Amino acid sequence: MSNDTRPIAVVTGASSGIGAASARRLAAEGFEVICAARRVDRIEALAKEIDGRAVRCDVTSAEDVAALAVAAGNEVAVLLNNAGGAFGLEPVAEADLDAWRRMFEVNVIAVAAVTKALLPALIAARGQIIVMGSTAGQVAYEGGGGYVAAKHGAKAVVDTLRLELFDQPVRVCEIAPGMVRSEGFALTRFEGDEAKAEAVYAGVAAPLTAEDIADIVGWVATRPEHVNIDRLTVRPRAQAAQHKVHRVN
């Protein structure tokens, strides 16, 4: 437990990419950030950098999620459900169903689990739930079957939560990024194949960065209490739609 007087923000998946950038931004906005992720060395270094706290948490583990709720305490001003990921890019007819289960577990079930565990503290703090979704949750694309299904599921969780919490002092927002060149996302999707990961961004002059999304997280988290940003979709200028990206040869 912390004696710090700063409002608490919990960030899952804080060890890299959008999660780490968002933790830094929330700290700059005056929050005491609890950095939650599996890679302890990374979150401990980040927590030291931003004067926050590190909690090892695999969001697919009920025991870890329960421990995270205890560490967060009785009042949580912001929960950023950022942990997620895509695995593979095969067509549905060749689906790796184990990978689909992993994607559903981390992108959907974990969002529900962490939110459920922290909801009493969020209500007590008149707080805000932010879910890191994706434009994949708005439109399908070839090869994205499992990830598209999972992010559509995350979107449905957000919309259902907002309806169910309409009489509670808790705001619910989804941030839905398009193409973001962040640490590890494409490498994870292609199991460390750097060539395939680089091909995702080939010829795109300026994909979004983790810091771009963190800037939005900071803005959403600091709106007045009566203002709810239901959903914010953000793409790089070069990406007009999921399937239409300007690439320079």
Image: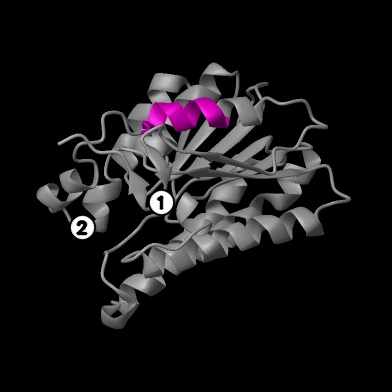
Residue at 63 percent of width and 31 percent of height: 220
Residue 242, numbered circle: 1
Residue at 71 percent of width and 51 percent of height: 119
Q: Magenta region: which residues? A: 208-217
Mark 1: secondary structure: loop
Earlier sequence position, callout 2 versus callout 1: 2
Residue 144: which quarter of the image? bottom left
Left or right of 71: which side holds 195?
A: left
Give the number of callouts.
2
Q: Does residue 154 lie above or below 247 as drawn?
A: below
Q: Nearer the viewer, mark 2 or mark 1?
A: 1
**Would residue 60 be seen by someone viewing this image from the given angle?**
no
Mark 2: secondary structure: loop
Q: Residues within 10 Å of mark 2 (few under 14, many from 20)?
A: some
Q: In the rendered image, which residue does mark 2 sit on?
A: 190
Left or right of 205: which side holds 214?
A: right
Q: Name the residue type under label 1.
A: Gln
Q: Name the residue type under label 2.
A: Phe
**Would residue 28 be seen by someone viewing this image from the given angle?**
yes
Residue at 37 percent of width and 72 percent of height: 100
Q: Does residue 59 lie above or below 7 as drawn?
A: below
Residue 162, numbered circle: none
Location of residue 112 in the rendering, given as x and y in whole percent from the top left corner: 60, 61
